[in-house]
Amino acid sequence: MRQGKNSATALIIAIMLGGFATTGYADHHGGSHSSLEALATGAHRSAANILRNAERHPVETLEFFGLEANMTVIEILPSTGWYTEIIAPYVRDQGKFYAAHFSPNASLSYMAPNLRNFEAKMSSDPALYGKVTVRHLNPPHEIVIAPAESADMALTFRNVHNWVMADQQHEFFATFFAALKPGGILGIVEHRAKADAGMEVMRTSGYVTEAYVKELAEAAGFEFVASSEVNANPSDPTVHPRGVWTLPPNFRMGDEDREKYAAIGESDRMTLKFRKPL
C-alpha cells in the first residue's frame, strides 16, 4: 500500500546527507549480482528518482511480477528510464534487457527527443547499461521488439492510456504477445479509472478501467494471473482538471491547488499480471 509522506521525507533527507545511496549500489561496476532493494536506492539513481519509490513501490511491484535475474525482459516504452535503472542492472549479468522505446520516425514531437535522451543515458554508463538493447516500437511500422517468442517477461508502467488515446491498444498488445515465450509474463501498471468510466473518459483522462485492460490482454491471447493493490491510492478521486497529469509528478496546473494535488500523491494504479498460454 502507499507509504506515508513522513517515510518519503526521511528517505530524501538520508539521501541528501549521503548516508543512504552510497550503501545502495555504489559498487554497480562490479560483476556481482545486486538485490532489487539495493538497486532501487543505489547511487546511480538521482535523489528525485529514489524519492518516487515511496509512491511507486518498485521492489514490491517487480517481486509481484516474478522478476528473476536470469530472465530476458522487455520494458515497454521506458521513457526516461525510471524503472530501467532498476531492472537493467538486475538482469545484466545473467539475463537480457530490451528497451522497446519510441522510434526516431514517430509522429509526435516529444518522442524522438525522449528516445535520444534515453540512449544518452544508456551510453553514459556502459558498465551499468552497456548490455541494454534498444528497439523501436511504432505500430504498425516497427513492432519487432525482441526475437519472436524469446522473452520471459514484458513490463509496462503507466502507458496503456497512451495507446488507448492513439487507438493503437490492440496493436501494442499483439506485439507483446509475439515477443513473449509461451508461459511468458506480461506485467502492467496503469492509472485506474472508476469501474463505470466510459471510453471517452479513457481517451482523455489518462485513466483506464481495470476491466478494459483485462479485455485488451485477453483479446490478444493472454490469460489473467493475478492483481495486486501495491500501487493503489484510495485518496485519488481520478477526476481532475487536467486528467491524471494534474497530479504529481506532472502538476499540469502549476501552482494552482498544488498542495491539494501533492497531498493526493500519484494516481490510483492497478497492477496486473498476465501469462501467455503454454
Image: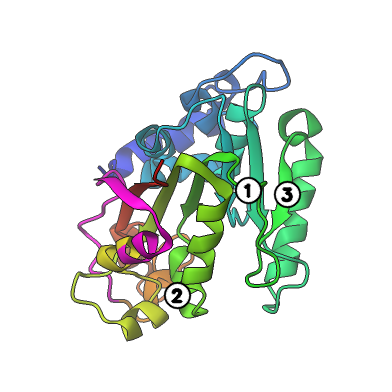
- Label 3–label 2 contact, CB within 8 A: no
For disc 2, the marked residue is 164
Mark 1 and mark 3 lie on one chain; the one further toward the N terminus is 3
Label 1: how many Cα within 10 Å (few below 14, some 14–19, many 20+)? some
Residue 72 is left or right of residue 247, and the answer is right
Question: Gap in Å between the C-alphas at discs 1 and 3?
Answer: 16 Å
- Relative to 46, does residue 248 appear above or below in the rendering? below
Residue 160 is left or right of residue 119, and the answer is left
| Callout 3: SS | strand
For disc 1, the marked residue is 148
Q: Which mark is residue 134?
A: 3
Q: Which mark is residue 192?
A: none
Of the pair 245 and 68, the residue shown nearer to us: 68
Mark 3 and mark 2 lie on one chain; the one further toward the N terminus is 3
Look at the image and give the residue range highlighted in magenta. 215-239
At 25% across and 54% down in the image, what residue appears? 233
Of the pair 270 and 24, the residue shown nearer to us: 270
Residue 50 is left or right of residue 278, and the answer is right
Which of the two marks, 2 or 1, is nearer to us in this view?
1
Would residue 45 be visible to someone looking at this image?
no
Q: Residue 153 placed where, x, y %?
A: 50, 41
